[in-house]
């Protein structure tokens, strides 16, 4: 049935390409929402779990939905992870560092190398401004920052500010002029080095 609906839309000739694309998108969303697996009576696994738990799974689900709705504003914000599972300084952002510079756009965090011999040129990490800096410093077994300092690198990382409506006129150029350049100047002031090994990250992956 789903394939028939999508094939019918795709084979219809008298629709503009953009309108057809939108129609296919919304049809696909509707068909996915109507999947039998999304309903208790037509999902054997959910039905089995409901019977085994005397409906406790449904109660927990409604409780979770209520919590998500209480934290939502204009639209339902469904949590994808356990927001209480991370504690700053314990299992996230756990590498010891200090803020050595800040302005209206960012704070610059310095992490000292843990080795006796230290590379002359410092390392500068720049996370995307839509992310948190600690994507590069998770728990100690998954921290890129921890690995760098243990290899003898002096590490400096930018922590971008959480923008509010007062930043609505801030553009990419501002993140360079008021972000990257002052960070480089601050690193030179701290280390005396004019050159850095720079690394930028896109989303959660370095490139």
Image (cartoon, grey):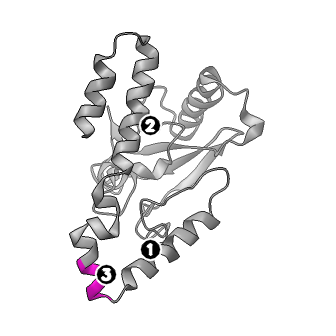
Q: Which residue is mark 1?
A: 61
Q: Which residue is mark 2?
A: 124
Q: Is residue 81 above or below residue 147?
A: below
Residue at 48% in and 67% down = 89
Between disc 3 and disc 1, the foreground one is 3
Q: Crowding near pointer 3: few (<14 within 10 Å), some, many (20+)?
A: some
Quarter of the image with the C terminus is: top left
Residue 40, given in percent of the width and then of the height, sits at: 33, 69
Residue 113, given in percent of the width and then of the height, sits at: 37, 52
Comparing 88 with 11, the one in front is 11
Comparing 46 with 172, the one in front is 46
Dominant SS type (magenta)? helix
Which residues fall within the magenta stretch?
Answer: 48-53
What whole-number distance in Å separates the C-alpha atoms at marks 3 and 2?
52 Å
**Secondary structure found at label 2:** strand
Q: Crowding near pointer 1: few (<14 within 10 Å), some, many (20+)?
A: few
Q: Quadrant location of residue 49?
A: bottom left
Residue at 45% in and 53% down = 134
Q: Which residue is mark 3?
A: 50
Q: In the rendered structure, which disc, 3 or 2, sits on the residue that comes first in sequence? A: 3
């Amino acid at each position: 049935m789903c394939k028939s609906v999508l094939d019918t839309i795709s084979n219809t000739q008298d629709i503009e390409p953009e309108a057809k694309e939108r129609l296919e998108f919304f049809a696909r969303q509707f068909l996915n929402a109507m999947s039998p697996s999304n309903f208790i009576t037509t999902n054997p696994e959910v039905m089995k779990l409901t019977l085994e738990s005397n409906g406790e799974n449904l109660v927990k689900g409604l409780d979770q939905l209520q919590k998500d709705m209480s934290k939502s504003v204009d639209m339902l914000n469904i949590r994808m992870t356990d927001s209480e599972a991370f504690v700053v300084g314990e299992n996230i952002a756990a590498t010891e560092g200090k803020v050595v510079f800040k302005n209206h756009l960012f704070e610059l965090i310095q992490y000292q190398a843990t080795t006796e011999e230290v590379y002359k040129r410092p390392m500068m990490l720049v996370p995307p401004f839509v992310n948190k800096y600690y994507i590069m410093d998770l728990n100690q077994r998954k921290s890129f920052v921890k690995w760098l300092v243990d290899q003898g690198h002096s590490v400096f990382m930018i922590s971008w500010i959480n923008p509010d409506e007062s930043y609505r006129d801030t553009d990419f150029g501002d993140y360079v002029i008021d972000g990257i350049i002052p960070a480089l100047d601050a690193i030179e002031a701290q280390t005396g080095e004019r050159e850095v090994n720079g690394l930028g990250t896109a989303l959660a992956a370095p490139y």
